[in-house]
Amino acid sequence: MSALYLVRHGQAGLRSNYDRLSDLGHEQTHLLGSYLALQEIPFAHLYCGELRRQKETAANAVSALRTSVQLQSDARWNEFDLDDVYRKIAPQIAAIDANFRDGYQEMLAAMDNPESTVHRGHSHLDAMVVLAWIANRFPYDGESFSDFTIRIQAALNSIKTSEGPTIVFTSATPTAIAIATALDLPLERSLKLAGVTYNASISTLRIQPQEISLFSFNGIPHLSEARLRTFR
């Protein structure tokens, strides 16, 4: 039996430039690294997705660990491309739903203001777009939800035979898919888990060749101040 530590990236940038850590995100992930170093976990494997925010999180955290283990990138742990999903599905929803269209136009206008709350919260528009993607309601030529979940589960299965603790620096939805898999939940419900996952949080799975079980979810002992605890 081995342990898998799934770490969500720190707070990312604004909606218009999301794939990078914010200043707060860098602070969160340095604190994460200091916490992990104090735990003296003998990580045998270090992985991260290939998105910039995932790589920056991994670099900040791993710099605090006293380890000779090399960090390896694995694109299977990437988040799904929300920007692409929005760009291609939101106009299709707007064409048939006037309320969505009005709200979407307001959101696009608000994105020009870096101080707008639209950058740091999940909205009902996000839920509508993502649920439409999950349900395959509209034509979409990008990665489907089905292909996305297959990708995450393949990455998870590849760790089953690993020996020793493994840490993966990833994102909210891949973490949620892994947890839903461990709990035998319908994968469509993973969206609710993703929505409550803190930035720079730690979730732990116990891995055996024939079984994956949840040990902990959404831990943030390293984020002691309220200002450090963010969701987006």
Image (cartoon, rainbow, N blue to C red):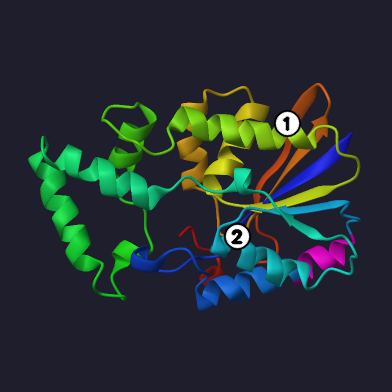
Tag on residue 140?
A: none
Tag on residue 54?
A: 2
> Considering depth in this image, is 152 or 22 the residue closer to the camera?
152
- How far apart are the alpha carbons under marks 1 and 2? 20 Å
- Badge 2, how many Cα within 10 Å: few under 14, some, many 20+? many
Inspect the magenta stretch and tell me whether residue 167 lies in it.
Answer: no
- Badge 1, how many Cα within 10 Å: few under 14, some, many 20+? some
Decide: is 35 above or below 125. Answer: below
Residue 225 in the image, given as x and y percentages of width and height: 59, 72
Q: What residue is shown at x 16% (from left), y 44% (from top)?
A: 100
Q: What residue is shown at x 21% (from left), y 59% (from top)?
A: 107
* Number of callouts: 2
Inspect the magenta stretch and tell me whether residue 39 lies in it.
Answer: yes
Decide: is 221 above or below 154. Answer: below
Residue 53 in the image, given as x and y percentages of width and height: 55, 63
**Side of 207 relative to 117 (left or right):** right
> Considering depth in this image, is 86 or 116 the residue closer to the camera?
86
Q: Amino acid at mark 1?
A: Asn
Locate residue 93: give its quadrant: top left
Residue 110 in the image, given as x and y percentages of width and height: 21, 67
Q: Can residue 128 be seen in this snapshot?
A: yes
Q: Quadrant of the C terminus?
A: bottom left
Q: Quadrant of the N terminus?
A: top right
Which element type, helix, strand or loop, lies under badge 1? helix
Main SS category, magenta section = helix
**Side of 52 relative to 162 (left or right):** left
Tag 1–tag 2 contact (CB < 8 Å): no
Q: Amino acid at mark 2?
A: Gln
Q: Which residue is mark 1?
A: 157
Magenta residues span: 34-40
Which element type, helix, strand or loop, lies under badge 2? helix
